[in-house]
Amino acid sequence: MREIRLKARAKINLTLDVTGKREDGYHLLETIMQTVALYDGIYMKKLEKPVIKLKTNLPWLPTDARNLAWKAANLMRETFGIKEGVFIEIDKRIPVAAGLAGGSTDCAAVLVGMNRLFGLGLSEAQLEEVAGRLGSDIPYCIRRGTVLCEGVGEVMTNVAHPCPDCYVVLAKLPVSVSTASVYKQLRWQEIEQHPDTKAMLKAMEEKDVAKMGKLLSNVLETVTIELHPRIAKIKARLMELGAEGALMSGSGPTVFALFTDRAKARKAAALVKREFALKDCLATRTYRVRRELRGEHNNDRNKIQHQYK
Ligand SMILES: C[C@](O)(CO)[C@H](O)COP(=O)(O)OP(=O)(O)OC[C@H]1O[C@@H](n2ccc(N)nc2=O)[C@H](O)[C@@H]1O
Ligand SMILES: Nc1ncnc2c1ncn2[C@@H]1O[C@H](COP(=O)(O)OP(=O)(O)OP(=O)(O)O)[C@@H](O)[C@H]1O
């Protein structure tokens, strides 16, 4: 194989709880992550020269070692002794620094791409292990779908009854939020309202999007909404426009809203985009992965893999 095209998809957090803090300062999480259809296009081609060349459609995005996609290619070359080089082109469509794991998902796609281009034969579990060395959301971006993530995100359990298909409006305020500073400002021991993760899993099992909407909850909202109160206004407006629920994703500032009706979702996205003068506001949908048992025949859900496309 000389070249490959992949879709690096964005994620939202349907619930996000902080349950403690590690000695190194990282916060312990309990979060249900969900992939959405919105993606960055990734094109990769082998190069004879031993170099990593990166190109993107956003002129201000770094294309050197500061880019997570570059880091992914570099780590794979070093770890597996790959002599050839690689050209990577990213068609960036996921808003940057938005709480949608845009950089992490590009990174994950490049790990998958390197594995296939150079015929390394790594399993999904092995790729997740490599991914964990590059960032906390990256193992999830390899696995995708509806996943309960604990630890700092690396302890993953596939959800037995994944999120029912529905429409998702993503609305990003034109402000940048530093994930590190949000966690730093969070007084996690004083959190009063924790998400009900079990109830959310049950609502998904019942395919009840209305119930899911009511259970959306993210403890990081307390910090980011204080900094940017317009996040709360966008949430309220999306609810007025017929959303089943609305929440900030990750550390923000993107708000997502769940809809059961496609036309309503598209109309809400168009209105919110205009009313709040947003550059990034669009309607997408949840993305479902088809998992299949590969190798051992046992009931361990985490051994059930999917074909990353
Ligand atoms: C908010 C989430 O996106 C939820 O999915 C993730 O927890 C954040 O993942 P991320 O953007 O990949 O974050 P990283 O780049 O790993 O971390 C940025 C900084 O946030 C803080 N951080 C991050 C993750 C975590 N569980 N606890 C933390 O305290 C650390 O100071 C870290 O240096
Ligand atoms: N491939 C990439 N795409 C986007 N940003 C990247 C990439 N590589 C590195 N970055 C840097 O990472 C920073 C965070 O961008 P990213 O889009 O990953 O944030 P995010 O959506 O908030 O992620 P998360 O949800 O994991 O916190 C940006 O400021 C950007 O300079």
Image (cartoon, rainbow, N blue to C red):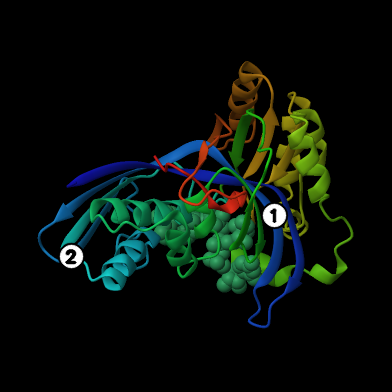
For label 1, the crowd category at 10 Å Cα-Cα, with few meaning under 14, some 14 to 19 and many 20 or more, is many
Q: Residue furthest front?
A: 297
Taking the image as drawn, is residue 177 in sight?
A: no
Q: Quadrant of the C terminus?
A: top left
> Which of the pair 38/133 is nearer the observer?
133
Residue drawn at (37%, 62%) of the image: 67
Describe residue 123's horizontal placement relative to residue 176 as left or right. Answer: left
- As drawn, the residue found furthest toward the left would be 48
Q: Is residue 91 left or right of residue 199?
A: left
Residue 60: x and y, percent? 35, 55
The residue wearing badge 2 is 51
Amino acid at the residue labelled 2: Val
In this view, 205 is above or below 299:
above
Would the CB of label 1 be found within 8 Å of ligand 1?
A: yes
Does residue 78 appear to the left or right of 111 in the view shown? Answer: left
Which residue occupies 63% across, 66% down? 152
In this view, the residue farthest toward the bottom is 23
Q: Is 276 placed above or below 71 here?
A: above
| Label number found at residue 31 | 1
Observer-side mark, 1 or 2, equals: 1
Q: Where residue 7 sits: x, y (%)? A: 39, 41
